[in-house]
Amino acid sequence: MTAAVTYEHIKTCKQSGARLGRVHTPHGIIETPAFMPVGTQATVKTMSPEELKEMDAQIILSNTYHLFIRPGHELVQAAGGLHKFMNWDRPILTDSGGFQVFSLSGIRKITEEGVQFKSHLNGDKLFLSPEKAMEIQNALGADIIMAFDECPPYPAEYSYIKASLERTSRWAERCLSSHAGKETQGLFAIIQGGMHEDLRRLSAEQLTSMDFPGYAIGGLSVGEPKHLMYEVLDYTTPLMPVNKPRYLMGVGSPDALIEGAIRGIDMFDCVLPTRIARNGTCMTSSGRLVIRNAKYAKDLGPLDPECSCYTCRNYSRAYIRHLIKADETFGIRLTTYHNLHFLLQLMRDVRKAISEDRLLDFRDAFFTSYGLHEN
Ligand SMILES: O=c1[nH]cnc2cc3nc(NCc4cccs4)[nH]c3cc12
Ligand SMILES: [Zn+2]
């Protein structure tokens, strides 16, 4: 039986080594490199599915941890699964919950079996394990699901990171066996190993020997300096199979998306565009713009003169600033729409630059205009 999720390599950029590809899933094809908007609680905050399609979001993310504690994966399953529940008929990826347990719930205890923790909502004692994470993600029905892993804290002792990645590999094995027979979903493993080349190699070897349909790089975008993240990518992506999707978790900012693509990454996700939109910070072609700033009070121009999105075609900075200052939800909808469109458009431009073998030139031009000089 053919795997539910497969990678099709289209071409490699002659100038940068970045690759153009397609990820085939049961709910459609994803042109890569791709940015995935995050819809943690079964919604990309304030956006409708129609608006997400309008900006051509190809795939969105949702979170196992959040949907497990509320409304519960059984309810979503009874509603026909996550696609039906949230009226999204394109691909969905769910994270496995491990990372959210560590970043959200206070009390927790890690054992070989799994993780005991308290719900950050009501303090209920809960438990997640590789098997439980597979049961939940199977009930939710996402096209791509993630193995249950531990993202070690940053920084952490070498010995802790080594022991943790070895357990993550044993957990990956358990995910594979409990997922067996449910090939309607593609199960990706997550490479750990902190910022150590030998440990990244060890994790990659252990996981690629188990033959997953796709591989993610975890343990990054956890507070480390950007140059360190790029260094880890420099020696980790070459360890990953060329014929499988490569997903960098939790990244990111416009510069990180471009630098990640140059290093062979195919898929990215980040809460940044939606999160900063809620306090009125916008990504524009000449850098970040904080709309609350008084200098925009009478500015009747668009958020970004270079942008063709719904927000920039119909509303002024003065109007959006007024809405944000007045705490009007429509203001957040307009900044969210623009920020998501900005990153989705950036990835369309990246794919075009790869197809024309000029991604390094594109990066230099983008960084100059965005105000990112080599630091
Ligand atoms: O190793 C990981 N395993 C599974 N999920 C993750 C999600 C991740 N998201 C970020 N960074 C983005 C952030 C989102 C919220 C706080 S940091 N880094 C991440 C690492 C992992
Ligand atoms: Zn715009």
Image (tube, grey):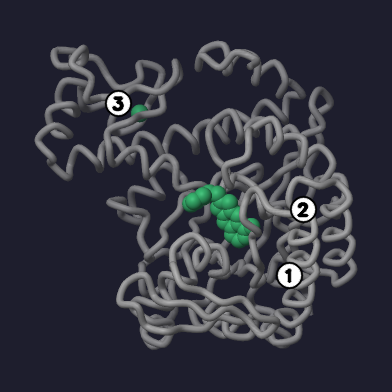
- Label 1, on which residue? 168
Along the line of sight, which residue is nearer the eye, 281 or 100? 100
Q: Is mark 2 within 8 Å of ligand 1?
A: no
Residue drawn at 49 percent across, 56 percent down: 60
Question: What amino acid is labelled 3 in the image?
Answer: Cys
Mark whose residue sits in front, 3 or 2? 3
Along the line of sight, which residue is nearer the eye, 91 or 127? 127
Mark whose residue sits in front, 2 or 1? 1
Relative height, residue 337 to residue 103 (above, below): above
Which of the labelled discs sits on residue 117, or is there none? Answer: none
Q: Can residue 36 be seen?
A: no
For the C terminus, which image quadrant?
A: top right
Circle nearer the N terminus (2, 1): 2
- Label 3, on which residue? 312
Mark whose residue sits in front, 1 or 3? 1
Instruction: Give the Cα separation between the discs numbered 2 and 1.
Output: 28 Å
Q: Are marks 3 and 2 in contact (CB under 8 Å)?
A: no
Q: Quadrant of residue 114?
A: bottom right
Question: What amino acid is labelled 1 in the image?
Answer: Thr
Instruction: Tell me the element at label 2.
Output: strand
Residue drawn at 61 percent across, 66 percent down: 144
Q: Is mark 1 within 8 Å of ligand 1?
A: no
Q: Is mark 3 within 8 Å of ligand 2?
A: yes
Instruction: Tell me the element at label 1.
Output: helix
Instruction: Tell me the element at label 3.
Output: helix
Relative height, residue 355 to residue 180 (above, below): above
Q: Position of residue 132 (x, y in %)?
A: 57, 84
Instruction: Give the Cα separation between the discs numbered 1 and 3.
Output: 45 Å
Q: Position of residue 118 (x, y in %)?
A: 42, 77
- Label 2, on which residue? 8
Question: What amino acid is labelled 2 in the image?
Answer: Glu
For the N terminus, which image quadrant?
A: bottom right
